[in-house]
Amino acid sequence: MQGYIHSFETFGTKDGPGIRFVLFMQGCPLRCLYCHNPDTWKIKKAKYELTPQEVFQEINKVKAFVRGGVTISGGEPLLQPEFILELFKICKEQNIHTAIDTSGILLNEQVKQVLEYTDLVLLDIKHINSEKYKKLTNASLEPTLKFMDYLASMNKSTWLRYVLVPNYTDEEEDLKEWARYASQFKNVERVDVLPFHQMAIHKWDELNIEYKLRDITPTSLEQKEKAETIFKSFGLPV
Ligand code: SF4
């Protein structure tokens, strides 16, 4: 079995606890307007096609440094659950911490199996308003909320992530609603507000895809702190 892989990073510090090996899978059913990796969207455009064992050999080479563990990101990693299941089984045999960064759009029996071998889920709830979520991602919000319910039912360690995009995801009422929703879950151990930036603009241009956020100013520190204050006021661990 081979996984369609975009790339990997051997010194990741933003995708889970500690220094981590981060694997970026190819393929994503969402079309987020702010996507930093539009080059991951099409699964067949993968740069690498590797078996779980081959990826584990790469992890092994840097095992001494990546003490935090392994995170699988993307793209949407859960598009390839069989591959991840095999890789995570190997990781768990070696006592390596496992994390998945997902939009939560897919929940099926295979994904549920993957979650059994996943120590931490980084779940991106990109908006709390269904219509605005759809406009932002071209997908429905409902599967992500069901995914969150499932994580709660397992009491799975979860970090929530929210990309703060001026004019799109920064309205005060929406932030409060998002926080109200998130604060009901006891398995949410951490919340990260991620500032929007324009560093991926060249990727959209290279792929010749229309980029609608060209005129949006990157999130300021003040805007980020304001959102964090709202989240904290609902008791969220920001
Ligand atoms: S879910 Fe992630 S990879 Fe997929 S379109 Fe959105 S930001 Fe891009």
Image (cartoon, grey):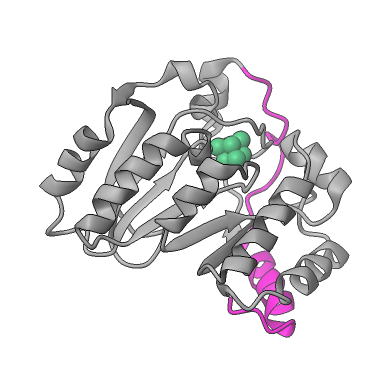
Q: Residue at x 37, y 67 (%)?
A: 17
> Where on the picture, by quarter, is residue 192?
bottom right
Q: Nearer the viewer, residue 165 or 107?
A: 107
Residues drawn in magenta:
209-238
Whole-percent x and y of residue 65? 16, 59
Asked whether residue 62 is drawn in magenta, I would say: no
Q: Residue at x 62, y 45 (%)?
A: 107
Q: Residue at x 78, y 48 (%)?
A: 142
Residue 35 appears anywhere in the view: no
Whole-percent x and y of residue 31? 67, 32
Image quadrant where one finds the C terminus: bottom right
The answer to whether residue 44 is above or below residue 20 is: above
Residue 100 appears anywhere in the view: yes
The answer to whether residue 202 is above or below residue 132 is: above
Q: Is residue 55 left or right of residue 186?
A: left
The answer to whether residue 207 is above or below residue 22 is: above
Q: Is residue 50 left or right of residue 27?
A: left
The answer to whether residue 136 is above or below residue 20 is: above
Q: Nearer the viewer, residue 169 or 100?
A: 100
